[in-house]
Amino acid sequence: IWTEQQNVPIHDDQGRLVAIEGIARDITSRMQRERELGGVVRVAAALRHAPTLEAMKPVIVGQVAGLLGAEGAALAMVDRTTGEVIVELAQGKWGGAAGLRLSPGTGLVGRVISTGHAYVSEDVAGDPFVARPDLIGITPAAALVPLVVQEQVIGALGVWRTLPFTQEDIRLLTAIADMAGNALHPAGGMETLEHRVAERRRELEEGNARIKQRDRLKRE
């Protein structure tokens, strides 16, 4: 929870300080949007320096792990020929999963891709959807979101760490996945990426403006 506090000193007739009057406001929503916007801008800036689609993949995985304080991350894509899910890249404890091919709907990434919805697990070791428990080690929490382009799921992006994931974390992960999907899609590229970054920035800034306006109205 983030709060903002404003204090006003109260003086008596002799100018002596006799009290401090203050008001505190919950600015968590505003800070969350600013964090999300900062993450989107940071990832977009890193992707601009990647010369090819293949070079973008480690950038995406590394950036999302750093922004979410994760101990590892993975990127999986759908093989458009076979429909299988391929773990293209994995870091950290799940590094051994890199190159793994899964049948459609299999494993955590397969579930996310088949449903098109985010999936959060607070006990990965005991999660019934894990396809290869021998590859994950001791991983308390994981969060995965789909990569969606033009209403089509083309892959999934996942992170894992010791601490549980918050809704704020999932929003940030989803925002990054939105950019990653557009950057990695054959019909996308940097032009589409720049468009999505500008669009996302506008959405977040408009949301922040509404929150600030609401705060001003509360003060009046």
Image (cartoon, helix red, strand yellow):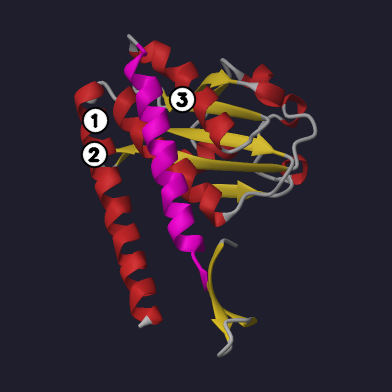
**Which quadrant is home to the C terminus?**
bottom left
Circles 2 and 1, Cβ within 8 Å, touching? The answer is yes
Q: Residues within 10 Å of mark 2 (few under 14, many from 20)?
A: some
Pinpoint residue 159: horizontal percent, then vertical percent: 59, 35
Q: Secondary structure at mark 2?
A: helix
Residue tagged 1: 194
Q: Residues within 10 Å of mark 1 (few under 14, many from 20)?
A: some
The disc, 3 or 2, on the residue closer to the chain's N-terminal end is 3
Q: Amino acid at mark 2?
A: Ala
Circles 3 and 1, Cβ within 8 Å, touching? The answer is no
Q: Is residue 124 above or below residue 12?
A: above
Res. 182 image quadrant: top left
Query: What is the CA distance from the residue labelled 3 to the residue labelled 1?
Result: 15 Å
Q: Residue at x 64, y 34 (%)?
A: 70
Residue tagged 3: 60
Q: Amino acid at mark 3?
A: Ile
Residue tagged 2: 198
Instruction: Name, please, the residue furthest toward the front.
Output: 14
Q: Residue at x 23, y 25 (%)?
A: 188
The stretch in magenta equals 25-50
Q: Secondary structure at mark 3?
A: helix
Q: Amino acid at mark 1?
A: Glu
